[in-house]
Amino acid sequence: MKFINNKLRIENAIIQNIAQRYNTPAYCYSYKQLKDNVNHFKKNFSSISPLICFAIKSNTNINLIKEIKKFGLGADVVSMGELMIALKAGINPKKIVFSGVGKTSKEINYAIDNKILLINAESKSEIKEIEKIAKIKKTQVQVGIRLNPNTDAKTLNQISTGKKENKFGVNDKIFYELVEYCKNSKNITLKCLSVHIGSQILDYKPYEKMLKVIGNVIKKAKFNFEYIDLGGGMGISYEKNTKKLNYKKYNLAIKKFLKGRKSKIIFEPGRSIIGNTAVLISKIIYIKRNNVKNFVIIDAAMNDLMRPALYGAVHQILPAIKKNKKSKRAYEFVGPICESTDKFTTIKNFQEVNEKDIIVIRDVGAYGMSLSSNYNLRPKPIEILIKGSKIKVIKKRQKHKDII
Ligand code: LLP
C-alpha cells in the first residue's frame, strides 16, 4: 500500500476509484501482501519444516482460503462451519486440525467422517465423547490434547488463552491422566500435544517459556508425540514503532526444544498471515464539532470492524488522497452506531478532512470481516481482492433484503 501522486493505492488499484465504483464501506485485500506474508512465515521456520494450518477464524472468506490453500497451507478450525468452508475451499483434510473447548457430538461426528488430521481435545469429557463416537463408527481417531501451560503471553487480557484462569486446555495433572487414558483406548490414537497461549504476541519470551513447560510435561508424560501443535498468536505492527516479534529467536527456541525429538511442528497462524493484507475503505458522512471534540462520522462502524470497540484495539487511519494542510484539532473517528464504544481512533495532526472524503482503516484483514455483525441491522460490507491491476469482488455487499 502506498501513495503515488498523493493517491493511495493497493497494488495498482487506486482506493478513491474503488470507493466510487464499489461504494463504501468496503474491505479491500492485497494478494501480493498475502503471498509475501505466507512466504515470510515459511522462510522464518524453514529449518523445522512445520505444517502451517491457517486459523480460519481470522478470515472466513472462501476465495481467500482458496488462495491460502494454493500456497500449500492447511487449516485450523474451531466449528463445523469453519471445517465445512476449509473442505469446500479444497484444503486437504489431512492438513486440518480442529480446536475449541466445546465441540458438540455433531461436530465431532463430522470431523471423524471427514478424516481430518487431528481433533485437539480440551477436556476429559471431550476425549470420552470422541471415544464414544469413534467406537460406534468402529474407527480409530487421531487426537491431540491441548495443554494449558499457565504461561502469560503478555498480550491483551481479552486475547490471552494460556493462563490457568483461562478456559482453554487442561492442566498438567489432567494431561498426564489423559495420556494414560488414551494409551489404553482402542478407538483413540494420541498423536499430538497442542497449545495456544494467546494472540497478538510481540515478545518471543512467552513462547520460550511455553516451550520449556511443554518440554517438562513431555518428559513426565513419557510419551512420544508425533506432532507438537504450537498454535498461532504471532503479532503484527498495528501502530508505528511497535516492536516486532523476533521470529529468529522463536525459531531457535523451537529448534532447541526439538533436539533429540522427532515430533513435527504444527502452527496455527491467523493474524500474521492475513492481518496486514486489508484496509476498510470508508466515506466521511458528517463532521461534527462541539466544545471539546471534532467528531468525524464515517460510514463504517463497529459492526463492520469490532476490534476497537471490543478490545480497545488501535488501527491506523489514512486518507485516500493526501493533502498538505494539517488539521489544528484532533479528529475522533466514529461510526454511526448507537453505542459510545463505536469509535475507531483519535488522531492529532491528521490532514484536514471534509465531508464525503474517503479514508481507510488499516490492517483489518484478521478478525475484521470475520467478527462483523448485522448490529443496527446494517448489511455487511463488500470484500474485494486486488491482484496487480485486477480487481475481483470476493464477496458481495449484503443487501437489506438479505437480512430483513
Ligand atoms: N489457534 C487457536 C487455538 C486460537 O484460538 C487462535 C486464535 C489461533 C490459533 C490464531 O491466532 P492468531 O495467529 O490469529 O493470533 N479476535 C481477536 C483475536 C482472537 C484470537 C482467538 N484465537 C482480535 O481481533 O485480536
Image (cartoon, rainbow, N blue to C red):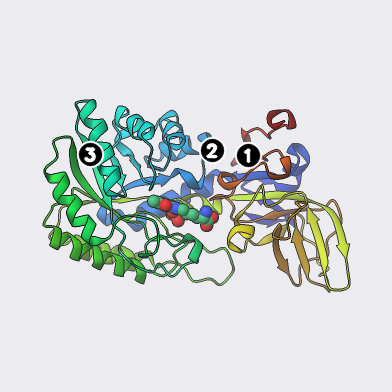
Image-based side of 139 in relation to 310, left or right: left
Secondary element at tag 2: loop
Q: Amino acid at mark 3?
A: Gln
Between the C-alphas of marks 2 and 1, the distance is 9 Å
Image coordinates for residue 133, horizontal then vertical, percent: 26, 31
Q: Amino acid at mark 2?
A: Asn
Secondary element at tag 1: strand
Image-based side of 251 in relation to 243, left or right: left
Image coordinates for residue 101, horizontal then vertical, percent: 38, 48
**Residue tagged 2:** 61
Image coordinates for residue 175, horizontal then vertical, percent: 22, 56
Say which label, 2 or 1, has the lower sequence index. 2
Indicate if the residue with disc 1 has its beta carbon within 8 Å of ligand 1.
no
Instruction: For marks 3 and 1, give the one nearer the viewer.
Output: 3
- Taking 204 as reference, is 308 above or below it? above
**Residue tagged 1:** 383
Q: Nearer the viewer, residue 233 or 36?
A: 233
Q: Are marks 2 and 1 in contact (CB under 8 Å)?
A: yes
Q: Residue at x 44, y 40 (%)?
A: 68
Crowd around label 3: few <14 · some 14–19 · many ≥20 (10 Å): some
Q: State the quadrant of the C terminus.
A: top right
Between the C-alphas of marks 2 and 3, the distance is 28 Å
Between the C-alphas of marks 3 and 1, the distance is 36 Å
**Residue tagged 3:** 142
Q: Amino acid at mark 1?
A: Glu
Q: Nearer the viewer, residue 96 or 67?
A: 96
